[in-house]
Amino acid sequence: MAWEAYVLTYRAMTPIALGAYRFGFIQRTRYYAPGWTLWGAITAQLTRAIFPKATGKTYQEVGSFVRKNLPTSWAYILTDEKPACPQYEEGQLCYGSLSAAEFEARFLASCGQTAVAPGSLTAHSGTLHETEALAAYERDGKPVRWQFTLYMRKPWTNPPRCPHDLTEERIVESLKYLSIGGDRRYGLGRLQQEEAPVLQEAGERDRPVPSEWHPKSRVLRAHMPFEDVPGEMVQGRLEAIPWRWWQNKPGGAWGPGQKREVRCLYTPGSKIKEGLAGHPVVGEYGIWHWQGEKG
């Protein structure tokens, strides 16, 4: 088994809202796109590209294929041609070379929204809210660019049956455009591939070692499950993330499944302390897992 890595660079065509949490009437955004967000975007785009008439079951099959064969890194905005990854400098959270305040001043935007009452065509009572988003253009007019790594398993595991041969080239070509984040029906979240993908070898093992991992700095560039690493071996913070599975209900309707749980994960920017042997690998949805050294 082998892996290849494609570094994909995109230009933001519209603002991108990556919902994090609510603060009063403000819907906050993340400052990066997690792997599970990219999984959904890639699944949707790939399904539409290879199936002329896709059903709910088709999306489910392609989603399973993407989860096992096409994990990604987290997607970050590029600053000075480098990903603006979270990291701590003297105890303060930074994004690349920018402080949190500098990053927000440079890339953060917002818009007011409300629901409309049908009877009066006025704002529905209690629905006014503000949505944060990451801008499509910087203050000086430069387009905002994003980058992430797409890992490809060779050979495929359980590929979906489709009308055309499912090749690496077809997959990369189908991802020329992506729609990520929230409020996509209102035009947000559109990305267009800006540069030719850069191909890299990612090794021959069960799971690829992330190209963003540096043994000297030991900083996480993706979420990692709490149970993978003892808490005393990590400097950083945890995030509780509600996890929900979707499936077909009896009768054929498409809706939420019954299985839900809350997962605790170390956030990007957290640091693995010296003394813990091993290295991370890229798992499903792009989540990193710690793999100890084999004795």
Image (spheres, helix red, strand yellow):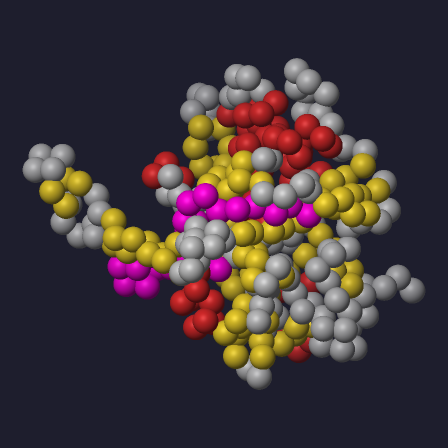
User: Where is residue 160, by image quadrant?
Assistant: top right
Q: In what quadrant of the picture does the N terminus appear? A: top right
Q: In this rendering, is residue 92 above or below 257?
A: below
Please give the name of the residue rendered at 30% of the width and 59% of the height, measured from the top-left corner: 26
Q: Position of residue 6 (x, y in %)?
A: 71, 44
**Residue toward you, 259 or 286:** 286
Residue at the limit of the structure toward the right, as seen here: 295
Q: Position of residue 93 (x, y in %)?
A: 52, 74
**Residue toward you, 233 or 156:** 156
- Name the dominant secondary structure of the magenta segment: strand
Left or right of 33? Residue 173 is: right
User: Where is residue 264, by image quadrant?
Assistant: bottom right
Q: Is residue 244 visible?
A: no
Q: In this rendering, is residue 128 above or below 269?
A: above
Q: Position of residue 90 (x, y in %)?
A: 57, 84
Left or right of 45? Residue 1 is: right
Residue 121 included in the magenta stretch of the image? no
Q: How many marks?
A: 0
Q: In this rendering, is residue 121 above or below 110?
A: above
Q: Position of residue 217 (x, y in %)?
A: 72, 73
**Residue toward you, 66 or 215:** 215
Q: In what quadrant of the picture does the C terminus appear? A: bottom right
Please give the name of the residue rendered at 38% of the width and 39% of the height, measured from the top-left corner: 187
Residue 26 included in the magenta stretch of the image? yes
Q: Is residue 42 visible?
A: yes
Please give the name of the residue rendered at 51% of the width and 49% of the height, measured from the top-left corner: 243
Q: In this rendering, is residue 170 above or below 185?
A: above
Residue at the limit of the structure toward the left, as seen here: 120
Which residues lie in the magenta part? Answer: 7-31
Please give the name of the residue rendered at 17% of the width and 41% of the height, measured from the top-left corner: 116
